[in-house]
Image (tube, rainbow, N blue to C red):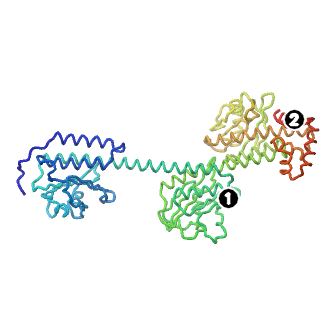
Amino acid sequence: MSSGKHSSEPLNLVDILATLNEIGARISRLGMGDDLRTTLQLVVEGAVQAVSAGVPPGTPHASAVIWMYDEASRTFVPDSRVSAGEPEHASTDDFPRPDGLGWRTIQYRRRLISYEQVGVDIHPAKRSAGAQVLVCTPLMVGGEIVGLLYVYRLEDRPFDEVELLALDNFANLAAMAIYHGRKVGGLSRELARRVSELEKLERASQMLSSCSNLEQILQEILSIGLDITAAQYGSFELYDPAQGMLTIRALAGRKGDQPDVGRPLPLDERSVVGWVAVNKKSLLIADLHDPHWRAIYQPLPADREMRSELAVPLIGPGGRVEGVLNLESPLPNAFTPADCRLLETLAAQAVVAIQEIRLLDVIHEIGEMLLTADEDQLFELIVDRACRLMNMPVGAIWTLAEDDMLVLRQSPPGYRRADRLPLDSSLTGLAVRLRRPITVDDLRQHPAFHRRDLAVAQNWVSAIIVPLLVPGKAGPLGCFSLYADHLRDFSAWDKKLLTILANQAAIAIQTARGVARLKAHNLSEREEEVLALLIQGYTNKQIAEVLTVTVNTVKKHVQSIFTKLNVDNRAAAVAKALQDMDR
């Protein structure tokens, strides 16, 4: 090797510093228009410049290469090569060799120079391109190696201290660029993943809102779960509290000749879905051959053996288990924690959708009772269905009397409550006065609750009280109150659900009272049905089709209605009926 003395001009430090400054600026802008490869290209060009002082521009003298490294997997990253200064037509086939200087640099975790090492030669591809000496510097951040910087010189001359110091600066900047670039890239990928998840969940929400019955919505929930996780097999088990069993209500991947969908499973830990329901926790099983899970796994009626499973619970109001959404795969490790989080979000949407369907069913049920049930029967139905929807053991309905007292009209058997409450000084009356739902964490401790002794005796803890308001009408009809036997945090959805039910209940109560007043006109049951259809704008022909009678029969009923209401046309009859209902 020749002496370190040479006739080259000194390094142009101003140019070196300018390059270092530009690299630092680009690192700070990674993720905002400047990509990592462009920044590393500046590093290798600067490294070549740092060891090429005095060499005329365009004269091959040195080259530099960066390879990125993944310390977690102890591998170099293919396609990560960035280079500068290489002679035209030089080979780029210089992937780090297991016995090369690069791997030794990683092992020693410090800079190594070829002429200071024994038993290690420069890569043949670089030798053939004229490389004589090599310095290899690890790119390190916080003790982690993220890559290597190779700098080759075509002249058989050692690197001096100034050159090595300059290369150290370029190596430090390259390390920061790779580290920061990976962080930015990871955040970008995470952001893209989250955006994709949100788009999937938004589509899921739209699809669920279009369902009109429970069976359709359960099948749709399962289909969406399969879609967002790319699974092909699964089931939806709905919990039946009356039987204490989980029953498959939707299935995917079923055998073509399978006549049934599997037997109901008890709510216990003797099955995977039972375990999820009992513990109210999601379960991701990487391999169903694991002895613990294999012992309790209940196979799907599918066309092949399942190897992995992801099951999430559907938790309704008050912590009630509504069911389990269960996905399975014939491949081990088919599901990820990200799949689990996504499915849990879908499960939360599904609970709301199921509640909406049940609310519609209750509203329809209330509507069907209007012409046949008296007011007390209607109150009983409203309280019972509200308790079921909200998973609360006891409820009551209060109506507002003319003396500004709230009168108890319905309470479940076995529960005691004062018959009358003052509107102005009671907690129940507060909801009526404010015309909005109010919630109480603990009735036993609330100073405005008149009968705290009763709350203690009956184990009433949290409560929600909702006014009965007819939309467009001035005064409330009263309120209904529901009581929980434990501390409960009522959600915005709980309040919205009960407000909708309360408004429909108020309309039903007002309508029932109107129907009762109409009965004073001695209308027959058939005439009441005809009048109800007249109010909805039906023609005689349409009424005949609905009631399965002739048009002449309808005309006779209409004429009888006119006589009993003391009117002479359809418009007057409808107006008279609506007036009675609004009183």
Amino acid at pointer 2: Ala
Taking 458 as reference, is 78 above or below it? below
Taking the image as drawn, is residue 42 in sight?
yes
The residue lying toward the viewer, choosing from 312 and 245, is: 312
Amino acid at pointer 1: Gly
Q: How many marks?
A: 2
Taking the image as drawn, is residue 291 in sight?
no
| Quarter containing the C terminus | top right
Q: Position of residue 534 (x, y in %)?
A: 84, 42
Q: Which residue shows up at 29% across the image and 53% down it?
A: 146
Q: Residues within 10 Å of mark 2 (few under 14, many from 20)?
A: some
Secondary structure category for the residue under label 1: loop
Q: Which residue shows up at 50% across the image and 68% down it?
A: 289
Q: Are marks 1 and 2 in contact (CB under 8 Å)?
A: no
Disc 2: which residue: 572
Q: Which mark is residue 499?
A: none
| Camera-side mark, 1 or 2 | 2
Q: Which mark is residue 244?
A: 1
Q: Residues within 10 Å of mark 1 (few under 14, many from 20)?
A: few
The residue lying toward the viewer, choosing from 62 and 184, is: 62
Q: Looking at the image, is mark 1 or mark 2 earlier in the sequence?
A: 1
Q: Is 534 left or right of 43, judged from the image as shown? A: right
**Label 1 – label 2 distance at C-alpha:** 54 Å
The image quarter containing residue 251 is: bottom right
Q: Position of residue 305 (x, y in %)?
A: 54, 70
